């Protein structure tokens, strides 16, 4: 079957399908119209019957009221006054476009309005003292009965005419309903047959086309692969060999009759290699490694042999003389077939920087040690003069208080107070120096036991300030015990000391184990341990502006005057130094008037 015949068949099938689709659409459209007629007629009948029922209830209600004088009987009448106008609006909208029905609806509306007027007049004249009906009431009742009969007749006319329409619509609906499935089935069968025929013919044509083009496709695929290989090779050579700043040399092993490697021949060398050796690539390819490097180190040749024999990568930093200048190179050798690839990376600047850093680190370490020694010695030596000052001040107050006036005693008191603050400052400096100079080794620390010892040390302060200290089960950490104890003592003591007026201090300590990744994310550190213990000490004190969260860890840094809170401003600096010594990290979070939180991590032993 040729393509022209396929097109003719397809056109005929398409015309038949379109005709069936049009017929199906007409049947469905007619069916939907008849269904709408049935629904519309049914709604008119129901609405008319509801109106008739409501006016009947109103009529019955007012008669009950006349007999019993009980207003409960008027409820259907009152409801009808509200419901019937709404239903008439619905019935009026349903009669649009049908003049006969509309006249009947209008007539029914007039009759119902007349009935309401009659009922209203009856209710107005029904106030009497006996059960005997008056002549006027009897006439109104007769008029209402006659009008009610007219309402029934008109309602029945509307319902009967609409029922006839419904019967006709139901008959038409059944015919369209039976015809629609048949047209659907015919359309589906013809469509399936057409699709099957066209699909089978299309498959044959495609198979024939594929068979004829198979050889061409195979040739094109082979050509594309070859082009890709050539492009990859060219790109690799261009990017690696020509543009690389590192020296790259490929060697092949030269073996003796016994199969042992005696030398290496140049297979290829990049531009950087020819510049370093000051030789052309042609010269290198015609010579061996020992020809070009006659004084090459014997141990390096042996390492190259091991790379070829074992496949292990060899790395080394080597110093070479290049153009009468000493330079450092990072040498890497990897096996490649029966040979190896050797790269030289110039790291002269990195090595010089490394030497400078080592020198600066050594000098900085010596300077820090000198400063620490000076601080320790100076602080220690300053205590003796202070003790003398305080001792002589005490003697002046005890032995000469009778001959010293009030101003002199005030001066001595100030001198004693200043000497006391100076002694506390020196003691804190000594503590800071001891932390810096500590050579104790870290041990496993049970934080619960250590915290109980700290609270015992702070018991006087806790009782004096009526503080509440709470803590849960805490993990075990790795650290210098004495320093961790001082760390907890300083932070808890601060939480009690910096209290809000007329408020009992509340300090809570919590802890949990976190991963190195979590520690790195929260504290921006290079984690040296797999897991850490994260401790949090929170209080309800005066807090501070969070912009000072880093400054408070500096030596002598105070956010409040000494008249408000005692202290030297060294306590948190000691905490930071302890944390550094124990390979941890610390930070503070706070808001003025809302308390503070000190969060720190220490290595975990779990």
Image (spheres, rainbow, N blue to C red):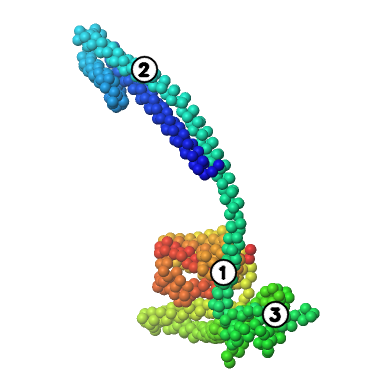
Q: Is 98 left, or right, of 33 in this rendering?
A: left
Residue 381 on image: x %, y %? 52, 86
The disc, 1 or 2, on the residue closer to the chain's N-terminal end is 2
Q: Nearer the viewer, residue 564 or 13?
A: 13
Q: Is 36 left, or right, of 300 in this rendering?
A: left
Asked if the residue at tag 2 contacts the one at tag 1, i.e. Cβ–Cβ closer than 8 Å, the answer is no
Q: Looking at the image, is 565 positioned above or below residue 418? A: above
Residue 48 on image: x %, y %? 32, 20
Q: Nearer the viewer, residue 119 or 428?
A: 119
Q: Which residue is mark 2?
A: 164
Mark 1 and mark 2: span between their CA atoms?
87 Å
The part of the image, by quadrant, that contains residue 498 is bottom left
Mark 1 crowdedness (10 Å alpha carbons): few <14, some 14-19, many ≥20 = few
Mark 3 and mark 1: span between their CA atoms?
32 Å
The answer to whether residue 56 of the structure is visible from this angle is: no
Residue 371 on image: x %, y %? 52, 84
Q: Is 236 left, or right, of 58 in this rendering?
A: right
- Return the mark for residue 304: 3
Q: Looking at the image, is 100 positioned above or below residue 502? A: above
| Residue at 55%, 74% in the rendered image | 239
Counting labels gives: 3
Q: Which residue is mark 1?
A: 231
| Residue at 44%, 63% in the rendered image | 595
Q: Looking at the image, is 79 positioned above or below residue 336? A: above
Give the structural element (helix, strand or loop) at label 3: helix
Residue 70 on image: x %, y %? 29, 16
Mark 2 and mark 3: span between their CA atoms?
110 Å
């Amino acid at each position: 079957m040729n393509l022209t015949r396929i097109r003719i068949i397809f056109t005929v099938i398409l015309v038949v399908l379109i005709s069936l689709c049009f017929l199906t659409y007409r049947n469905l459209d007619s069916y939907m119209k008849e269904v709408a007629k049935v629904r519309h007629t049914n709604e008119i009948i129901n609405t008319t019957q509801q109106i008739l029922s409501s006016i009947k209830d109103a009529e019955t209600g007012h008669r009950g009221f006349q007999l019993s004088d009980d207003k409960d009987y008027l409820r259907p009448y009152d409801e009808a006054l509200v419901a019937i106008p709404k239903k008439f609006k619905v019935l009026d909208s349903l009669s649009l476009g049908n003049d006969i029905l509309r006249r009947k609806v209008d007539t029914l509306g007039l009759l119902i309005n007349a009935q309401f007027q009659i009922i209203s007049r009856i209710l107005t004249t029904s106030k009497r003292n006996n059960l005997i009906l008056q002549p006027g009431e009897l006439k109104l009742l007769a008029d209402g009965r006659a009008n009610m009969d007219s309402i029934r007749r008109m309602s029945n006319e509307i319902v009967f005419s609409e029922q006839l329409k419904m019967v006709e619509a139901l008959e038409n609906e059944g015919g369209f309903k039976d015809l629609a499935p048949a047209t659907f089935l015919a359309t589906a069968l013809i469509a399936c047959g057409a699709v099957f025929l066209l699909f089978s013919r299309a498959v044959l044509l495609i198979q024939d086309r594929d068979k004829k083009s198979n050889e061409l496709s195979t040739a094109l695929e082979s050509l594309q692969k070859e082009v890709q290989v050539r492009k990859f090779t060219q790109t690799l050579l261009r990017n690696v060999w020509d543009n690389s700043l590192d020296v790259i040399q490929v060697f092949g092993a030269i073996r003796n009759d016994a199969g042992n490697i005696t030398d290496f021949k140049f297979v290829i060398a990049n531009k950087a290699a020819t510049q370093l050796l000051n030789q052309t690539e042609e010269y290198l390819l015609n010579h061996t490694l020992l020809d070009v490097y006659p004084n090459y180190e014997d141990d390096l040749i042996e390492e190259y042999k091991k790379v070829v024999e074992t496949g292990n990568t060899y790395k080394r930093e080597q110093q070479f003389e290049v153009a009468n200048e000493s330079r450092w190179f990072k040498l890497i050798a990897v096996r490649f077939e029966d040979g190896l690839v050797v790269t030289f990376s110039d790291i002269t600047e990195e090595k010089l920087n490394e030497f400078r850093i080592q020198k600066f680190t050594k000098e900085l370490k010596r300077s820090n040690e000198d400063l620490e020694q000076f601080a320790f010695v100076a602080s220690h030596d300053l205590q003796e003069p202070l003790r003398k000052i305080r001792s002589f001040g005490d003697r002046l107050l005890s032995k000469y208080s009778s001959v010293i006036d009030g101003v002199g005693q005030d001066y001595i008191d100030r001198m004693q107070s200043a000497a006391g603050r100076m002694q506390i400052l020196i003691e804190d400096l000594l503590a800071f120096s001891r932390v810096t100079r500590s050579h104790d080794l870290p041990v496993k620390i049970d934080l619960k036991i250590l915290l109980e010892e700290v609270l015992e040390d702070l018991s006087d302060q806790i009782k004096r300030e009526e503080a509440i200290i709470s803590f849960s089960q805490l993990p075990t950490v790795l650290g210098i015990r004495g320093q961790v104890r001082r760390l907890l003592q300083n932070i808890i003591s601060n939480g009690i000391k910096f209290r809000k007026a007329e408020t009992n201090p509340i300090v809570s300590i919590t802890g949990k184990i976190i991963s190195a990744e979590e520690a790195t994310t929260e504290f921006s550190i290079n984690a040296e341990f797999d897991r850490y213990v994260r401790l949090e000490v929170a209080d309800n004190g005066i807090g501070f502006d969070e912009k000072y969260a880093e400054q408070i860890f500096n030596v002598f840094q105070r956010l409040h005057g000494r008249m408000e809170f005692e202290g030297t401003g060294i306590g948190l600096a000691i905490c930071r130094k302890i944390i550094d010594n124990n390979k941890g990290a610390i930070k503070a979070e706070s808001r003025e008037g809302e308390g503070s939180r000190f969060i720190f991590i220490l290595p975990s032993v779990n």
